Image: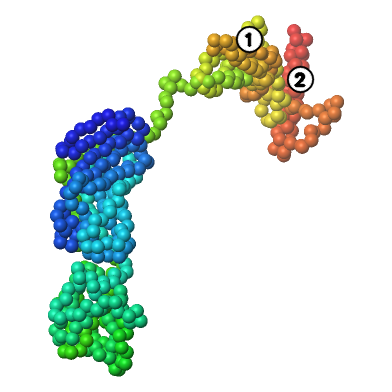
Amino acid sequence: MISALGLVGGALVVLPSVPAGANSAELVVDYSCTGGPTSVASHGPVSLTTRVSVPTTLTVGQPLNVQWALGYKGDAARFGSPDYFAAGGKATVTGNVQLSGVWNGILQPSGSVEQAELGKDEILKLPESISDSAHTNRAGKLRVTPQQLFVDFTPPKGEDVVNDDDFARVKYAGAWEDLNDQPRNNNDYHYDIHRTVDKGAKAELTFTGTGIEYVAQRDYRAGRVLFYIDGQPATPASVDASKNTNGTPSNDANKGGQTLWRFHGLKYGKHLVQVVNDEQDKWAQLDAFRVITDELVEAPQEHRATCTLVSAPVSVDVTISSGSTPTPTNSEGPVGTPTCTPVSYPATPTCTPGSPTPTCTPTPTRTCTPTTPPPTCTSTPYPTGCPSPTITPTCRVVTPTPTPTGTPPVTPTPTPTCVVSPSPTTSTTPTPTQGGTSTTTSTATPKPTLTVTATVTPTRPTPTAPQVVITPSGGAQTGEAPEGSPSGPGLIGAGAAMVLGSAWGGVALKRRRAAHARGGQD
């Protein structure tokens, strides 16, 4: 159903009634076609009316398909056969469509139709439609402009036999006898033949093809005839029908249907062949000509007709969209059901050394891994109804045994080290309720007691008295040296200390005795 008709630049534009996924426009465009004297439009302009269909909206990847419906316009002239041809010829129509915009190029819709046996100027059948398509690989605007049409004719490969009685094609000059109803055993084409005994009498044929052959009788009463191609002596230039192919005289009489001479390899086109009797009172005969056409790779240009627009050029704009589906964005983040995974509580204690008890402060940490939709994650440090755990660190001071050296004993200063026992874990399970909200239920495991162990590192104050530390072996003092005796310098130092101690003790004893004596005298 047509909803809109418009005349644009002299061309009728037809638009579809309802927009669809593959909208299209139709241009009704008229052409006038002309050609040369051997073209399919040799007798004057031929008028065509066409309907060009072009899609107006496409998606990248869809083909741009242009179709051309063809037809003769009114009762005007038609395309005609350039000559006589056997069945199998082909009429081809090729369009020319200019593309501009998102890319530039040319489409060439084409179509052909095979012809039956053709006489000269016999009307050619045209293809009902022609089409071509292009692959779309980018989005944008494209303008489609129909331009010229070309009509070509390709002759069939093969041969066309022209009988001696085809007076429309074969022309005679001089005295020729037309002999019909010849005996069948003579084997003449169509059982007839033309004959002359006058020197200079000739027969000629204008043909279109690539070669020509001469068919006549071999007979001992015949003579020599001459051949001309396009006005020039051919090769071979003559043949004597009274002789065999090897040049020996023939005893045959009325042996018809013989190909006595041939000329191949002509350029395809229109040519003239002439046969001339070269001997007086000798038979010169013509049974038929055989026209040869070799296979042609391309349609001959001499048969082409060029069709131009009667009106000004018209165009159709095509919109090619990318066809990609946009990915929706959500500024509020992902949506879905949240999954909350509590981390051990406390995660990392902070210990502050003190005297005598260090202070340990736990740092609670909780993480939530959201999925879609965005969660509302409310973290409750401790479940409702459960007492908050109290972290009471227990510190144990360890007094190390000093290693015997030659230095006085030191007073240790404790440095606490906090040992944190595993902490309780809290699991949060969101329970959906009607209306899209959720209730979070938490379960807590009581925390164990935090134990703190203090390690004492000795310092080196001024000694108050010399000491020798004896490490007991077993349960009593035996004076044994500990396993792994000290080194030599250590023993020397110990001995020196004992000597000094004894001397110091003797001096002190003498002083006490002297003091005691003075006190007695007083």
Q: Earlier in the sequence, mark 2 or mark 1?
A: 1
Q: Is 168 displayed left or right of 514 in the figure?
A: left
Residue at which label 1 appears: 383
- Marks counted in the figure total 2
**Amino acid under label 2?**
Leu
Picture coordinates of residue 239, whole percent (x, y): 24, 86
| Relative horizontal placement of residue 488, taking residue 104 as reference (left or right) | right
* 467 to 170, vertically: above or below: above
Residue 221 vs 167, above or below: the answer is below
When the figure is inspected, residue 151 is found, relative to residue 377, above or below; the finding is below
Give the residue drawn at x 30%, y 94%.
248
Split into 4 quadrants, where in the image is the C terminus? top right
Which element type, helix, strand or loop, lies under badge 2?
Answer: helix
Foreground pick, 51 / 367: 51
Tag 2 residue: 509
Residue 322: in sight, yes or no? no
Q: Residue at x 24, y 63 (%)?
A: 119
Identified at 31% across, 92% down, the residue is 251
Give above or below for 488 relative to 81.
Answer: above
Under mark 1, the amino acid is Pro
